[in-house]
Image (cartoon, helix red, strand yellow):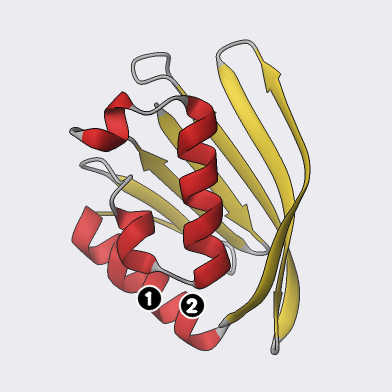
Amino acid sequence: MRIFCTIFAFMLLISLGTGEAKAQSRSQTLNAVVKAIQTGNSNLLASYFSSRVELTIVNQRNLYSPQQAKFVMREFFGTYPPSSFNIKHTGNTGSTTYALGSFISSRGSFEVNIFIKSEGSGY
């Protein structure tokens, strides 16, 4: 499965790689990603990264290794520690599961879009 996240001016493209994460359903994956965002847990979020991770922060898009992306996410959560994260809407379209949410930090509020696709189904 592949996961795409957009947080305000932040876009995170992650892909389920191997192990437990790969065996999870899209619903279980979404729940784990939501928990990681709610708690600002870059380590948990990184457990869903594949060999390349695409991040866009303040309109600057880059590809990162999983370790680099984990560091960038740790920096993001350090700058914008989550006060709350709530899913407003979820759905499915084709092979994609998506969720729209609201990320609130003491430093600002952000819209979040999460897209989960089965691995191999393309972006």
> On the image, which quarter does residue 95 sit in?
top right
Query: Label 1 amino acid?
Result: Arg
Which residue does the image show at 20% across and 62% down from the upper left? Answer: 67
Q: At 30% from the left edge and 46% from the top edge, which residue is drawn? A: 49
Can you tell which quarter of the image residue 112 is in?
Answer: bottom right
Residue 11, compared with residue 106, is above or below; it is above
* Residue 83 screen position, x and y as percent: 67, 79
Q: Nearer the viewer, residue 30 or 122?
A: 30
Q: Is residue 43 left or right of residue 89?
A: left
* Residue picked out by circle 2: 77
Q: Which residue is mark 1?
A: 74
Q: Is 63 rendered above or below residue 122?
A: below
Q: x%, y% of residue 32? A: 46, 48
Quadrant in which the N terminus is drawn: top left
What label does residue 8 carry, if any? none
Judged from this view, the residue extending furthest toward the right is: 88
SS category of the residue bearing label 1: helix
Report which quarter residue 48 is drawn in.
top left
